[in-house]
Each structure stands twice: as C-alpha cells, then as structure tokens.
Image (cartoon, rainbow, N blue to C red):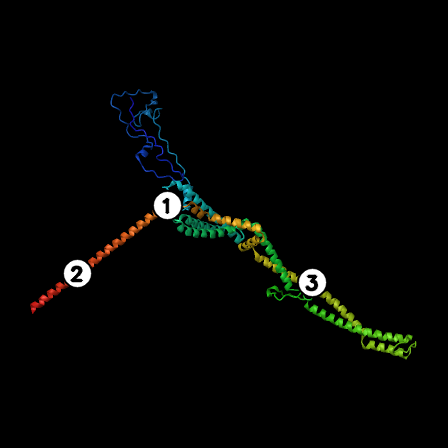
Amino acid sequence: MHPTDNTPSPDPEPHGRHAAPSDPDATVPLRRTPELDATVPLRPHTGPAAEPTPGPQPQPAPTAGGTGGTANTAGAGGEGGEGGEGGERPPAAPRRRLPRPQLGRRLRVLAGVDERLLDRVPQERAWYTSLGGVVLGTATIAAISMYFAITQAMGASSWLAVFPVLVWFLFILNVDRWLVSSRLGEGWFRRVPVLAMRVLMAFFFGVIIAEPLVLRIFETAVIQHVADQRTEALAQLAGRLKVCNPVPGSEEPAAPADCKAVDTFNFDQSPTATQRELTARRADAAELQKTLDADSAQLRTINDLARRECVGDSGAGLTGQAGVGPNCRRLRTEADAFKRTRQIDANGVKLVNLRTQISELESASRASHAKFEAERETKIQARVAEERSHQGNIGLLERLGALHDLADSSGVLAVGIWAVRIFFILVDCMPILVKFVGGSTTYDKLVSAQLAVAERDLNHDIEAEYAEREAVLRKRRAEIDLEILEHKAELNSRLHRAADRLSERV
C-alpha cells in the first residue's frame, strides 16, 4: 500500500458569493472568511512525509535504473521519485498582470466622487463616470477655445500659448467639478436659486468660450471682410490726403476746413509762384489787349474817314471832293499822330512779348503741376504704406467687429452665427444641466446623510466640550470660593487669638 495523503481537497468556490462588481474599474473589497481561504490552492508540502496508515506495508519493488519511482511526497522517495511519471510537478509561477489604467475611476474623480462611499451603490458608477467625461469634454473644448483666442490675438501660432491654455483648462475643469460635485439641496425652493446661479455662471463662461470657436468656424468670411475693410480704409485715407492737398492753380477745389494738420503735406517746390506770375502776365496781356483793341478801333475810324474824304464820299464832316485835298491830308495826319501817340505798334509788340511769356509760364506751370502731383502722390503712397504697416496681423477685436458686421449684413449668416454660438454655450452648460436633469441620486442622499451625521457629531462634540469647560469652570469657581472661605476662617481665627491675648494682658 502507498501512504495516503491526508491533505484536504479545496472546496469549490460558492457561486454568487463574491461576484464581481458591475464596474470593471473598481472592485469591492472582500472580507477574509474560511470559505475564501479554502478557495486558495495549497502549495505542495515540502516537510516530512505523511505518516502511513497502521498495518504492514509492502516494500516497493525496485525499478530498473531507478527511473520509474512511485508517487511519493517530496523527501520520501528514491532517486527516481522526482523524475518518474508518477511524481508531483512543481507549481507554475503566477503570471504577472499588467496594471489596469482604471479610466473610469479617473473620470469619476473629475465628478468629485468619493469612491469609498460609491462602493455602497455600485450601480451608479456608470452615471458618475459619464458625468466626469462630460466635465472633461467641456474643459477640453474650453482649452481649444483659449488656444484659438490666443492665436487669433497674436496672429500666429506659438508654443507660448500652451501655458495659458493649460491654466484655462485646469480652471474650467475645477469650476465644472465644483458645479457638479456640490449639492443642489433638497426641494425646489432650495434647488432653483442655486441652480440659477450655477447656470448663470456656466452661461457667461459659455459665451466667453464660444466666441473664439465661432470666429474659427467663420474664419474665411471674417478674414475676407477685415481685408476689405482695411483696403477701403486705405483708399479713404488716400482720397482724403489728396483732397486736403490740392494742386495750386488747378481746377481742383480748395482744401476743406476740416482737414487736420496731419492730413497736409509740406512740399519742396510749389507752383504757386509760377501760377501767381502767370496770372499777373495774363492780366497784363488782357489789359493791354483791351487798350490795343480800343486804340485800333479808333485808328480804323480815323483812317476810314480820311479814306472817304480822299475818294470824295459825301457825309457829315466830309467835303465831297475827290483827291488829296487839305481835309484828306489833315485826316491822314491825325491818324498818324494818333498812332504815334497811342503807341499802337509798340503795344502790339509788347502784347506779343507778353503772350510769349505767358506761353513759357504756362509750360513751366504745367511742369510744376506735374512735379507737384508726382510729389503729392509719392507722399500719399508713403503715408498709405505706413498705415498699412501699422495694421499688422488681424487681431481679435477686428475679428469680433467683422463678425458683428457680417451678422448685421445678412440675416441667414446671423442665424448661422447665433446657432453655432448657442450650441457651444449649451455644451459648456452641459455639466450643470446633466447634474440637474439627473436629480438627486442615491449617492447624493448618502452624502447628505453622511454630512448630517458629521454635523450631528460635530454638534455633539461641541456640546460635550462646552459642558466639559463649564464643569471645569464650576470646579474652579468652587475651589476659589473654598479658598476664600478658608482665608476668611483663618483671618477670624487670627482675630480671635489676638483678642484673647489682649484680654489676658488687660
């Protein structure tokens, strides 16, 4: 007979006693029980062999080569005990499991959940896991919005935007965590004011978060509108500079009275002097032309009268006799004298010279005007280029103004802009809305009960401490009263002894 193994076989694990919780991310701690200990597989016994049963035991027959050994426990067989077919195999090394990420637990942290308290209601783990995911989603959208706002304000992407984006992400994450983790209170009269305050906060944060996202969605139209506005502003600037700096002596109107000092230029050379001289020459030529025309008309009258007298025409002041008579010679002499006196020939030459000067001045004036216009155009282009350089990249305020203008210019576009804006506002309000729609869960009631117990314990501790202090105070007061009585008794005793001594002396 072989020695019997008295090791008890492990009991099968009872069904349903240690069932896994509904959430795979968190396990319910198990208490140690004899049934649980029995389910643990026993290691092979490495001590001395079990005692054989009483009675004669036959000796095992030796096997050839000692390779066949019997099924003995460790330390009781021969050489072939371990290598034989009937020997016990060493226990396999347990496989090391990789640590689980516990994503659900991490999401529930964002919802402000106490896992030890939630273990009492494992059915609500999925609810609070989803609530933590909503909080994480809103914080992520807020971070993306902040990144868009910074890049739009700077006009370019930069790694420096990571720091404010991270700060904004953590801030919104903590605000939403506070909104969903704190209690709303019991009853509508307590829930509505708290809910209104939180929804109002979420709304304002939603407006701030939604605007950069709306600008990003309508970026193409916004950038085109800003570019058109800038082009129009530069064109208006160039036109105003041209109006405020008219060419002197041209048909352009005079500069308006509202032109500022920054709108006027200082020119190196102005055609004003040339234009003034040209105007004077034109006035002289016109005056001389008028005098010359009058003298020439009067000379023609005298010559015509002398001609009629010489040919014998009859009329007033005429003799009617043909030939060069005294009257004919007199009239011709008067005509020659008038011509010399009025300097008709000299005035004609002077008029020709004036017209030549006027022609030269007109050429010089045209050249001066062309130079003035070229210099003015150069200065205008320089001012426009300077203003264009000051524009720089499209900033956040310009984008907001362009988005407002686009909404005012088109009703369809305004509806689209507000639809996107309201969508992102509702997304940011989602955590508090989910918290309100879900109502008070069992976990919330457990939290309220735990807080009530803690408040009651705190009040009890305060009352106990107050009572203890009152007792100490009463004890101290009694001790003081006793000390006063003892002091009074001592004084009375001394007084009586002094009186007795005094009476004895008397």
Report the residue marked by disc 1.
445
Query: Looking at the picture, which amino acid does disc 3 mark?
Result: Ala
267 over 397 or under it: above or below: below
Mark sitting earlier along the chain (1/3): 3
Picture quadrant of residue 99: top left
Is residue 445 shown left or right of residue 168? left
Task: Please tell me the numbered disc located at residue 370.
Answer: 3
Picture quadrant of residue 334: bottom right
Between disc 1 and disc 3, the foreground one is 1
Cα gap from disc 2 to disc 1, whole angstroms:
59 Å
Closer to the camera, 453 or 7?
A: 453
Picture quadrant of residue 8: top left
- List x then y, in percent, for residue 506: 7, 69
Look at 52% across and 48% down and name the residue there: 420
- List x then y, in percent, for residue 482: 18, 59
| SS at mark 3 in the image | helix
Cα gap from disc 1 to disc 3, whole angstroms:
90 Å
Is residue 332 shown left or right of residue 75? right
Mark sitting earlier along the chain (2/1): 1
370 over 302 or under it: above or below: above
Between disc 2 and disc 3, the foreground one is 2
